[in-house]
Amino acid sequence: MRLIGQVPSQLDDRFYEYTQARGPEFRISVGGEPISEELGLMVRPSVPASSF
């Protein structure tokens, strides 16, 4: 699954589908990001450097 350069909402959907098809647990973090501890992955939208 390609992780870089994806629309965040589409990536969330693809990540959910991937975890459902392959078995790793899918959860939503307190901040609203999809995570899988088994995969060691949290999907977070990038923040432009100009916003700091």
Image (tube, grey):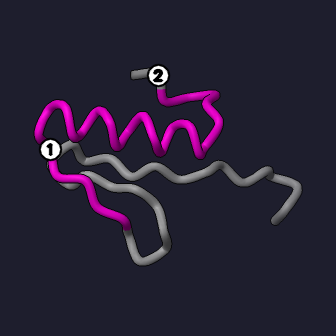
Looking at the image, is 29 positioned above or below residue 25?
below
Q: Which residue in the protein does label 2 denote?
A: 2
Q: Position of residue 10 (x, y in %)?
A: 56, 37
Q: Any magenta on residue 19? A: yes
Give SS at disc 2: loop
Q: Position of residue 16 (x, y in %)?
A: 34, 43
Q: Which residue in the protein does label 1 denote?
A: 24
Query: Nearer the N terminus, badge 1 or badge 2?
Result: 2
Few, some or many C-alpha atoms within 10 Å of disc 2 (few <14, some 14-19, many ≥20)? few
Quarter of the figure with residue 9? top right
Q: Which quarter shows the N terminus?
A: top left
Lateral position of residue 12 relative to residue 25, left or right: right
> Three-letter amino acid code at disc 1?
Pro
State the residue in front, 37 or 26: 26
Q: Position of residue 13 (x, y in %)?
A: 45, 41
Q: Residue furthest left?
A: 23
Looking at the image, is 31 positioned above or below residue 9?
below
Q: Label 1 vs label 2: CA separation?
A: 17 Å
What is the magenta range? 3-28
Q: Position of residue 41 (x, y in %)?
A: 32, 47
Residue at point 60%, 44% (across, down) = 8
